[in-house]
Image: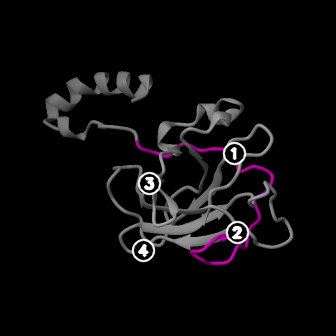
Amino acid sequence: MKRTSFIGSLLFLPVAKLFGKANILPLKECKTQRDAEGPFYKPGAPLKVIIETEGQPLHIAGTIFKASDCTTPVANAVIDIWHCDSSGNYDNQGFKCRGVVKSDSRGKYAFKTIFPPSYGSRPRHIHVKVRAEGHTELTTQIYFQGDTNLQNDFARNAETSRVLSLTSGQGEQHGLFDIYI
């Protein structure tokens, strides 16, 4: 909890006690941290669950939740995904390593792609832009534990929820990334 939220909660305690609503205090903050869109975003990516196949296989899955209560799933959210190819290049002409997936009625989403390489001093990362009716658009990036380049740029400020721990199975890496909008 941020300091300002904590102080605000403390100031609200006497009012909550007076009206018997102590359970309405915020228990935690769960909004996913924003991150730079970067110069390579391109609108209009096609709807597809397999984003890229040329490289080390990676499967990312998660749930889109409302940040206001941290538990309500968001159905039909549009998740725009883009990252560099296995050589560290972005396709600005077509839609290689770009795609859109949607969350289902339970807020669940999944896609398969490759484990993108780092390039320059940038750590491995995947860009994500989430849009859903009634919610502010969120642009963020996913990073990966153990990447030595995490300390080299603005990624060093990434919340731990955006730095994924991967597991291996069935010849591919797996990561869980829940998103709160």
The range drawn in magenta is 30-53
Whole-Å distance between the Cαs marked 3 and 2?
25 Å
Residue 79, image x and y in percent? 57, 65
Please report whichever mark, 3 or 2, sits nearer to the chain's N-terminal start.
Answer: 2
Asked whether residue 43 is drawn in magenta, I would say yes
Residue 21, image x and y in percent? 17, 38
Report the amino acid beneath label 1: Ala
Q: Nearer the viewer, residue 30 or 156?
A: 156
Marker disc for residue 104: 4
Q: Residue at x 24, y 40 (%)?
A: 24
Whole-Å distance between the Cαs marked 1 and 2?
26 Å
Element at label 2? loop
Q: Quadrant of the N terminus?
A: top left
Element at label 4? loop
Q: Is residue 127 left or right of residue 4?
A: right
Please report whichever mark, 1 or 3, sits nearer to the chain's N-terminal start.
Answer: 1
Q: Is residue 116 left or right of residue 167?
A: right
Marker disc for residue 178: 3
Q: Name the residue tied to disc 2.
A: 54
